[in-house]
Image (cartoon, grey):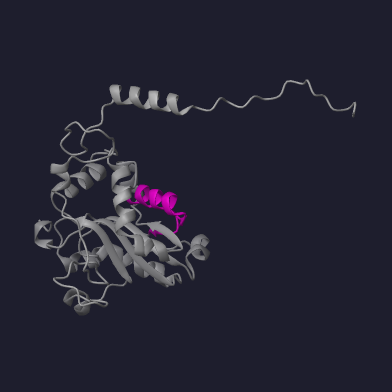
Amino acid sequence: MREDVETNEEMPQALPRRTPLLRRGMAWLSDVVFPPVCLSCRAGLVTHDALCPACWSRIDFIRPPLCDRLGLPMPYDTGGTMISAAAAADPPSYERARAVAHYTGVMRELVHDFKFSDWHAARKLLSRLMAEAGKSLIAEADVVVPVPLSRARLISRRFNQAALLAQDLSRSSGIVYEPLALVRTRATPQQVGLTRAERKLNVRGAFAVPRAKAACIAGRRVLLVDDVITTGATCGSAARALTRAGAAQVDVLALALVTDYSTVAA
C-alpha cells in the first residue's frame, strides 16, 4: 500500500441533492405564497406562466398557410411556396419573417406590458410561443441577433425586450447568441405616428455590424429577433446592415405582426 496517500483527510462534501419529495414540497410552498394566476386577467390557475382559456382564446394566432416572405396569413393553401401581393410588390430585405400572433387582443396587452411597463412575468410564455412559431427558421439559423435599442432608450428602459427574447431562444435551441453583433449608429425618433414611407426613412442607415463582430456574421444564417413587426421598416434596415456585413441569410422572428397598419399608425 502506498504510504504517501492519505485516505482520512477531510474532503469537500457535495451538497445534498434535493429529493423529488423536497422539490414537490418547495413547489407547493411557492404556490401557496405566490399562487399561479392568468398572466392577463389574473384569474386563478393550476400552473404558472400560462393564460386562462378565455384569455388564450383572445390571442389571434398566425397559422399556415402563410406568405413565405412576410409571414402574412394567406386565404388558402396552394400546396407550394406562396408569396403575397404585398411581398411581390415590395420584397423585404430579409428572406422570411414569422410571428406568433396578430398585434391585437391579449398579445398586444402582453407585449405592451413587457415592453413599456417593465413587466417580465410573461417572458417564459412568450419565449415558448416564439420558439414554436419560428421552428422552421430556428432549424436553419447559425446565430441569433436581437434588434438593438439606441443607448439613450436602453438607459431609460433599462432592458432590451428583443435581447431577452433572443437570449431565451438561444438557450432553448442551442443557437449562438450574439447580442452585440448589431448596433444602432444613431438615435431615431419613435416610429409611432409615422407613415410607412416615413418609417423607412427614419431608420435608413440606423444599424451597423461592428468591425469586431464581423466574423460572427459573415457567411452565417442570422435569425433577427424583434418584439413586433409593424411595417417591416426597422427589421428591413437591420437586415440590410447584416447583409452588408456578409450574412448568408437573414430571417426575422417576432412576437406579433401588424396586419392592419391603420390600427397602430395613430
Say which of 25 and 188 sits in front: 25
Where 250 sits versus 145, above or below? below
Quadrant in the picture for the C terminus: bottom left
Where 104 sits versus 38, above or below? below
Where 151 sits versus 31, above or below? below
User: Is residue 115 left or right of 246 when viewed as pictured?
Assistant: left
Residue drawn at 45 percent across, 58 percent down: 181
Say which of 88 and 18 sits in front: 18
The reply to whether residue 204 is visible in this rendering is no
Task: Give the quarter of the image for residue 7.
Answer: top right
Say which of 108 and 212 sits in front: 108
The reply to whether residue 38 is visible in this rendering is yes
Say which of 82 and 16 sits in front: 16
Name the residue at the front extreme.
21
User: Is residue 215 left or right of 139 when viewed as pictured?
Assistant: right
Residue drawn at 15 percent across, 63 percent down: 259
Examine the structure image and report whether residue 165 is included in the region drawn in magenta. Answer: yes
User: Is residue 23 left or right of 160 when viewed as pictured?
Assistant: right
Examine the structure image and report whether residue 45 is included in the region drawn in magenta. Answer: no
Quadrant in the picture for the N terminus: top right
Task: Give the quarter of the image for residue 23.
Answer: top left
State the count of labels.
0
User: Is residue 122 left or right of 250 when viewed as pictured?
Assistant: left
Residue 156 image point, x, y percent: 30, 42
Residue 87 image point, x, y percent: 22, 75
The magenta segment is: 162-184
Task: Give the quarter of the image for residue 5.
Answer: top right
Residue 138 image point, x, y percent: 39, 61
Where 59 sits versus 195, above or below? above
Residue 13 image point, x, y percent: 64, 24
